[in-house]
Image (cartoon, rainbow, N blue to C red):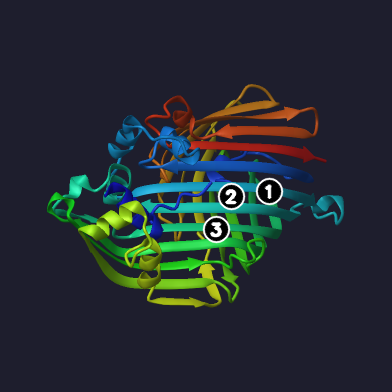
Amino acid sequence: MKKSVIYILVFFGVLIISNRKSNAQNIGLLNDTIKNTVSLDFNYLHNSTAFTNEFIKTYYLGKYISQDIKDNVKRKLNDMNLFGQELNTSLYGIIHFDSVLHSPNHNLYIGVSSQSLLNLYFPNDLFKVVFYGNKEFLNDTAYFNYLRSTYYKYQSFDVGWLYQKNYKNLSLTSGIKISLLKGQQFYDVGMINGYLYTGNLGSSIDLGAKAVVLQSDTANPAYSGTGSAITFFTEIYVSEKSKIHIEFNDLGFITWNKNTLAQSGDTSFNFTGADIVELINGNSTSTSIDSISSNFFEKSSKEKTTTVLPARIFVYYQEKINEKWQYSLGLQQRLFFYYNMFFFGRVNYSFNKKITANIQIAYGGYGNLAVGTGIRAKLGKSWQVIMQSNNIEGLILPKSFGGLSLQTGIIKQF
């Protein structure tokens, strides 16, 4: 019976875990001056309130998930179980107008990037049924309400303007960026409500769900939509050594082409006796998975669809204590995603004019408590290298934490 239940749940799309840089990773030095710059960045992040890194690694590699690995996740389940994954690569340049137009406060930003975002919210009962079977729910009901899995992959061409001024020995920057987007892949699976009732002794199963599925054009996975987005930020003077940064990032949309699949269903099934055996054996009967699939989606069409990007609001306070020490306190929130408010505190220490290191403590986002560290080094007169991980806890304790992140950057200034 356990195998049959897993097949059914996979059909419903309820366990979809697929193989931009967080602004909280990109807080620069307080008095950095904008120069002609070329930068190549790579950023990866995944985190979860429930999954551990040991579980994620084992699942992705398709290896056997032991009882201990599952139990470590089960102990972390709560009312809001999240998993998030972000991957971003970007290449951008900043042209200082003082070099070409003799306008020292104005700068042109031009860049390209590729971004993928995965967001999963799942109820407790779903994990228990999929990985432990439905024995725990004999003569009881497992609920799968509000399951949601969303995935975006898109590229952008960015043009922006940056304005920097010095006010009482403090450098303040404001800017705006317009992005033209090429949508590559998208899906959104949502289960408004769902349940699985297992009869006494496991002799019958009642399965029901109300679900909606959107999926971009699978025949054109390289280019299936277009859109645009806007990013703008400003910095507010607080004192001669402190400022507040406010940013709205990727406020935009993508319109997916007319071959976007839209499906919905609201129905229930009952399996008893031999029907359950047929499901376990995988026989092609009227109760097979293919039959369930064709009967479940009452409505199915292909049509142009517009989706709103999971934009980000980012605010932090930054203060320079002296020439060596600086700290930042801030928060971040994603819109239109399952995401907890992300709070962080960071301390920077400059060993000398070339090397700066930091330690960060954070809570929220896709996960819970997170500890990070990083270094920024100047090589020669014009090169800089950045290495940052905000989830050291996931590397040290993979059986207890589910976070892993890496930011690398190579910067050339002229």
Q: Amino acid at mark 3?
A: Tyr
- Which residue matches tag 3? 152
Residue 169 horizontal/vertical position (percent) = 65, 40
Q: Closer to the camera, 268 or 260?
A: 268
Query: From the viewer's perspective, is the residue at label 1 or at label 3 nearer?
Result: 3
Q: Residue at x 72, y 43 (%)?
A: 40
Residue indicated by mark 1: 90
Q: On screen, 388 above or below 156?
A: above
N-terminal of the pair, mark 1 or mark 2, is 2
* Residue 269, position as x, y percentages in the image: 26, 66
- For label 1, count other residues whose C-alpha is less than 10 Å away and answer few (under 14), some (14-19) or many (20+): many
Q: Foreground mark, 2 or 3? A: 3
Identified by mark 1, the residue type is Ser
In space, the residues marked 1 and 2 are separated at their CA atoms by: 9 Å
Residue 299: % across, % down = 41, 77
Residue 137's tag is none
Q: Could you tell me how far apart the alpha carbons at marks 1 and 3 are, in whole angstroms?
A: 16 Å
> Circle 1 sits in a helix, a strand or a loop, which is it?
strand
Element at label 3: strand
